[in-house]
C-alpha cells in the first residue's frame, strides 16, 4: 500500500522548484492515478515513473525539513 503524500501550502515553493517532468508526474499521481497508467500516459517505463515520483517527494520532504529546522 502506498503511503499518502499530501502537499501543504508551505510545500508550494518546493513543488514549483522541481523540474517540470517531476511536477507533472507528481501532480498526476496526486489524483490517484496508478503508476502503470502514468507510465502509459507519459510514455515512460514504470521504473522511470516510480523513480521520478520518489525523487520529487524526497526533494519536497527535504525542503520541508530544512524549513522546520530554521
Image (tube, helix red, strand yellow):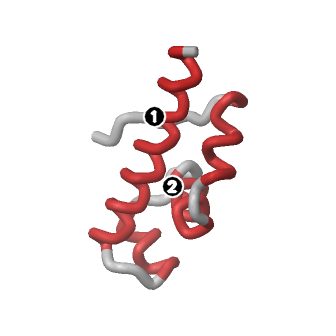
Q: Nearer the viewer, mark 2 or mark 1?
A: 1
Q: Which mark is residue 14?
A: none
**Toward which corner of the image does residue 24 lie, by quadrant?**
bottom right
Q: Residues within 10 Å of mark 1 (few under 14, many from 20)?
A: few
Viewport quadrant of the N terminus: top left
Element type at marker 2?
Answer: helix
Q: Nearer the viewer, residue 11 or 3?
A: 11
| Residue that extends furthest to the front in the rendered view of this protein | 70
Residue 23, relative to residue 36: is it above or below?
Answer: above
Q: Identify the residue shown where x is 34% and y is 71%.
A: 48
Inter-mark Cα distance, 2 to 1: 19 Å
Image-based side of 47 in relation to 53, left or right = left
Residue 54, relative to residue 51: is it above or below?
Answer: above
Residue 69, relative to residue 56: is it above or below?
Answer: above
Q: Position of residue 45 (x, y in %)?
A: 32, 78
Q: Position of residue 20 (x, y in %)?
A: 62, 66
Element type at marker 1?
Answer: helix
**Toward which corner of the image does residue 8 lie, by quadrant?**
top right
Q: Identify the residue shown where x is 47% and y is 44%.
A: 59
According to the picture, the residue beneath numbered tag 2 turns out to be 29
Q: Position of residue 35 (x, y in %)?
A: 38, 63
According to the picture, the residue beneath numbered tag 1 turns out to be 62
Q: Identify the residue shown where x is 62% and y is 42%.
A: 14
Residue 27, relative to residue 24: is it above or below?
Answer: above
Amino acid at each position: 500500500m502506498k503511503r499518502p503524500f499530501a502537499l501543504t501550502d508551505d510545500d508550494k515553493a518546493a513543488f514549483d522548484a522541481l523540474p517540470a517532468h517531476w511536477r507533472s508526474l507528481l501532480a498526476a499521481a496526486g489524483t490517484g492515478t496508478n503508476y502503470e497508467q502514468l507510465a502509459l500516459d507519459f510514455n515512460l517505463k514504470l521504473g522511470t515513473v516510480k523513480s521520478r515520483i520518489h525523487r520529487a517527494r524526497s526533494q519536497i520532504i527535504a525542503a520541508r525539513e530544512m524549513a522546520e529546522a530554521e
